[in-house]
Amino acid sequence: MPLMLRALKLAVLPYGVAFRERRPGLVILVYHRVGGDTRSEIDLPVALFRRQMAYARRYYPITSLDSILNGSWALEQRSDVLAVTFDDGCLEVYEQAFPVLLAYQIPATIYLATSYVESQRPFDFGGYARSHHQPLPLTWSHVREMVDSGLITVGAHTHNHADLTRLAADQVRNEVRRSRDLIEDRLGRTPIHFAYPWGRATPVAKQIVGEAFATAAQGGCAKNPFGNLDPLELWRQPVQQSDGFWLFRLRLKSYLDAEEYFRSAAARFR
């Protein structure tokens, strides 16, 4: 499987050479697990994550999502700027990724599926459901410690990691508000960042999210050019185990932007 996935990435490189986004912009990396010791695409070995962060810190300016809104960075940047994010809120983020972020002083946003943090039940959706060792969530104590470091910002990822495209408007509003209110209650600060579970949303869901949050991250695989950056429709780059280190470097430069398109197209013909 890793060889097949790398083959897919290499196959889209000619497309990336021809059509990649060349305008400078905000590149938002999305991670899920670090150091879970599984073969899952969303579970990166700690050594690989450390090498990626060392490279990012050396060669790119790195910003927090907060700074996009408070004006502490210049949108007229002539080079790409990176932001680091994590979805779901796995315990490994605290145990394995956070020490690396501290070492390199890299800010990051963690989007929490709050019902899992609150109940402390293992993550059981998507690929996690098929895992023999379902990852545990962060505790609120872990989250507070990371936030107190000044490097970590907390965002919402709905309460139950719900697919908002399958819910009625009142259900969407409940998922969005419960996650926001619970974070505010447990941490004493209102979250302003949101990430759509599965990267999917309807126009109604986007409207509801926009009423409660200042930024929203969607699915896909793209850069956010500075000239038309929309905080409520932020694209992200999903970092995967099969990227390794060298493909990760190409991902940062938009050479793999077509990967998700071709992956989805291939899935339709299976």
Image (tube, rainbow, N blue to C red):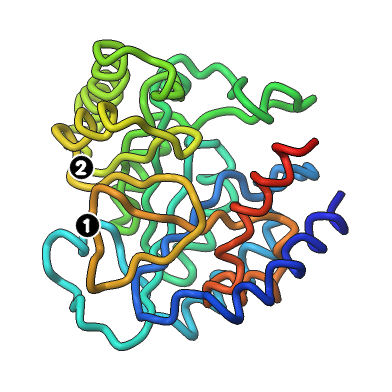
Q: Are marks 2 and 1 in contact (CB under 8 Å)?
A: yes
Q: Is residue 207 left or right of residue 71?
A: right
- Residue 262 placed where, x, y %? 66, 54
Please tell me in which quadrant of the rendered image residue 225 appears: bottom left
Please tell me whether mark 2 sits on a helix, a strand or a loop. Answer: loop
Name the residue nearer the viewer: 47 or 261: 261
* Residue located beneath label 2 in the image: 192
Q: Nearer the viewer, residue 220 or 179?
A: 220
- Label 2: few (<14), some (14–19) or many (≥20) C-alpha neighbours in 10 Å: some
Q: Amino acid at mark 2?
A: Ile
Left or right side of 115 for 135: right
Amino acid identity at mark 1:
Asp
Q: Depth check: 267 or 51 in front?
A: 267
* Front residue of this view, candidates 222 and 38: 222
Q: Is residue 178 left or right of residue 130?
A: left
Q: CA distance from mark 2 to mark 1?
A: 8 Å
Residue 1, above or below 78:
above
Q: Earlier in the sequence, mark 2 or mark 1?
A: 1
**Residue sitting at x 57%, y 46%:** 95
Q: Which mark is residue 146?
A: none
Q: Position of residue 73 (x, y in %)?
A: 19, 74
Which residue is pictured at 55% across the width and 16% down the height? 121
Mark seen at residue 66: 1
Packing grade of label 1 (10 A; few <14, some 14-19, many >=20) is some
Residue at 26% in and 44% down: 193
